[in-house]
Image (cartoon, coloured by chain):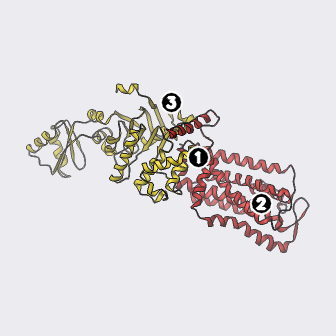
Chain colours: A red, B yellow
């Protein structure tokens, strides 16, 4: 008897929602995908997760403190002199956020889509494609956030965060991870083979190396600068670097806007694509 | 079928059509499903059964026609309709990264069910599916029959009004099939409406109150198993076998003897009211079949007649 009542309630929740806009694609339960994520994660390989985290830390040690000794200080773009380690640390934080989010939203999503088939199952419940898109993207961004928090925990004690604005680097990293996870999943949903998946990796490496990560983009001719500045990692690097070095200006909102658009586009295309793939 | 008039219709399809580019998977079919009945979609592979199931399950949008499930229109009310449905897809599609009980739990969460509700519900479903001992195994460690039972248990987590089963026993051994049939009977007794696709005739006869036979996206016939047998077949069937080369020649002689005759690659089926009598006539006529069998007519005979045997895989 009691069970009947509870189910009636669950159905009632669905029907109350039905009056809201978008009820045919969204039922407000994307968080249940996070619950699934944690349950599945318990049984997975921690080493792979850990290896993704240590990568930017190794870069910081090798370049920041190793090569940094040879370089000395440099100008941060706002006229301040900073150590080379302090220059690249924010970039590596942004990269951490990107790596975590991209790893999950590309390879893991690709696997779930084509082999695990879990999206079909989710879509046979009372969730809609937007629930699934938002839930999976949120789960992917969580890894990006975890990586960047871990990175902060390492760089803060060694004095690479010089002011209180630096704390905003974490929400900034969350935004960056959200943007990459969103677009990452959208792109993955259009890819059909492992070869195509490798293009993603192929694109990420040069973006990591040349987005103002290890040297200012002012070294490029103007037209290359324009291309680099259109790339999402440069936007992320600029945002985190300005925050960690305390170069605060209204201009930072343009980076925020960039990621908001990225998130919205990614969510939209992922939802459309999930519907096309699994609800045809 | 006058009793049906008073019963509540839970699924209504009118001129229901699904086209994929040039291919017409479902070609303007009409049917109704009543609350509490067990409704079967029968047909060879590619007949459009699974596509019809997907449209009813509100995971596939129709191209044309009308469809209402529990009085609602699926294109706009998909999540709302699915809240009342239990969907068991043809492939089991279990979450292989999760344990058996977690499969039930997580799926229940997808429906927005509370942890408090799910805790006893999971126990109930594990009992029902006879999977208590396997509760902590990963889903892909289960045997085929167990996986199918888990998929059905998962489909029941939201206490659905309609359970959609797409070929529920395909690929299972006879024992696993019988266990599953028993479980499905129990659900029917509890008042759950079952919609089942199958290409096993014995399964349809066992499980379905009423069924439609589909072929090439269209409905060829509709009725209860008994009605269909009565309408499209005779009471009894005599099966005789003369050896591969001699069947054709023997068939010519047999043609006049029964109501109707069907020549299969390996044997001849003769449809008649009185099987034993016919068989003795055959023997008296001096034809000595290698093997012979008199049996009651079954849905398989209906199916052969309606869809043509060459289509069956």
**Dot 1 falls on which chain?**
A
Q: How crowded is mark 1: few (under 14 residues within 10 Å), some or many (20 or more)?
A: many
Badge nearest the viewer, 2 or 3: 3
Reading the image, the residue beneath label 1 is: A274
Q: Secondary structure beneath disc 2?
A: loop
Identify the residue shown where x is 32% and y is 34%.
B224
Q: Name the residue under label 2.
A: A211
Which dot, 2 or 1, sits closer to the camera? 1
Dot 2 or dot 1, earlier in sequence: 2
Left or right relative to B136: residue B277:
left
Q: Is residue B60 visible?
A: no
Tell me which chain the residue with mark 3 is part of: B
For disc 3, the neighbor class at 10 Å (few under 14, some 14 to 19, many from 20) is few
Instruction: State left or right for residue B149 relative to residue A86.
Output: left
Which residue was labeled with disc 3? B71
Q: How far apart are marks 3 and 1 (CA)?
A: 26 Å
**What separation in Å lies between label 2 and label 3 (alpha carbons)?**
56 Å
Residue B264 rendering spot, x and y as whole percentages: 25, 46
Front disc: 3 or 1 = 3
The residue drawn where x is 70% and y is 63% is: A205
């Amino acid at each position: 008897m009691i069970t009947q009542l509870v189910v009636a309630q669950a159905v009632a929740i669905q029907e109350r929602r039905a009056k809201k806009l978008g009820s045919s694609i969204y039922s407000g339960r994307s968080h249940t995908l996070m619950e699934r994520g944690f349950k599945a994660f318990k049984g997975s390989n921690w080493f792979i997760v850990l290896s993704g985290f240590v990568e930017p830390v190794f870069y910081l040690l090798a370049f920041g403190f190793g090569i940094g000794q040879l370089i000395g200080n440099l100008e941060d773009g706002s006229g301040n002199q900073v150590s080379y380690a302090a220059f690249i640390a924010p970039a590596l934080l942004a990269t951490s956020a990107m790596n975590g989010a991209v790893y999950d939203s590309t390879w893991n999503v690709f696997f779930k889509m084509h082999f695990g088939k879990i999206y079909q199952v989710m879509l046979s419940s009372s969730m809609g494609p937007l629930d699934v898109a938002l839930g999976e993207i949120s789960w992917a961004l969580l890894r990006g956030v975890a990586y960047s928090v871990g990175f902060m925990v390492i760089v803060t004690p060694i004095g690479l965060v010089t002011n209180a604005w630096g704390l905003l680097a974490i929400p900034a990293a969350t935004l960056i991870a959200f943007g990459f996870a969103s677009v990452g999943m959208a792109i993955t949903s259009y890819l059909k083979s492992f070869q195509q998946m490798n293009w993603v990796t192929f694109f990420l490496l040069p973006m990591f190396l040349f987005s103002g990560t290890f040297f200012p983009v002012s070294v490029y001719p103007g037209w290359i600068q324009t291309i680099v500045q259109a790339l999402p990692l440069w936007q992320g690097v600029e945002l985190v670097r300005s925050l960690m070095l305390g170069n605060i200006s209204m201009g930072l909102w343009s980076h925020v806007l960039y990621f908001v658009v990225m998130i919205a586009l990614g969510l939209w295309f992922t939802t459309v694509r999930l519907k096309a793939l699994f609800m045809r | 079928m006058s009793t049906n008039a008073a019963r509540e219709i839970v699924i209504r399809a009118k001129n229901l059509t699904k086209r994929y580019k040039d291919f017409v998977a479902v070609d303007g079919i009409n049917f109704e499903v009543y609350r509490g009945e067990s409704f079967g979609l029968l047909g060879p592979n590619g007949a459009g059964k699974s596509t019809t199931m997907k449209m009813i399950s509100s995971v596939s949008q129709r191209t044309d026609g009308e469809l209402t499930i529990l009085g609602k229109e699926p294109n706009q009310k998909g999540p709302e309709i699915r809240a009342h449905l239990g969907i068991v897809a043809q492939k089991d599609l279990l979450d292989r990264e999760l344990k058996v009980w977690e499969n039930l739990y997580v799926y229940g969460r997808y429906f927005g069910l509370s942890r408090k509700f799910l805790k006893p519900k999971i126990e109930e479903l594990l009992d029902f599916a006879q999977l208590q001992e396997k509760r902590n195994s990963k889903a892909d460690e289960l045997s085929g029959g167990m996986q199918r039972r888990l998929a059905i248990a998962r489909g029941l987590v939201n206490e659905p009004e309609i359970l959609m089963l797409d070929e529920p026993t395909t690929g299972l051994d006879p024992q696993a099939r019988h266990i599953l049939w028993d479980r499905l009977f129990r659900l029917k007794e509890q008042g759950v409406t079952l919609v089942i696709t199958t290409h096993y005739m014995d399964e349809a006869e066992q499980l379905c109150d009423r069924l439609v036979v589909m072929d090439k996206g269209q409905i060829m016939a509709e009725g209860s198993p008994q009605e269909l047998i009565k309408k499209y077949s005779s009471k009894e069937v005599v099966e005789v076998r003369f050896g591969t080369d001699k069947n054709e020649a023997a068939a010519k002689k047999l043609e006049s003897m029964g109501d109707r005759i069907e020549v299969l690659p390996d044997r001849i089926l003769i449809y008649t009211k009185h099987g034993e009598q016919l068989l003795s006539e055959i023997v008296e006529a001096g034809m000595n079949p290698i093997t012979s069998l008199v049996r009651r007519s079954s849905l398989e005979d209906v199916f052969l007649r309606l869809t043509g045997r060459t289509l069956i895989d």
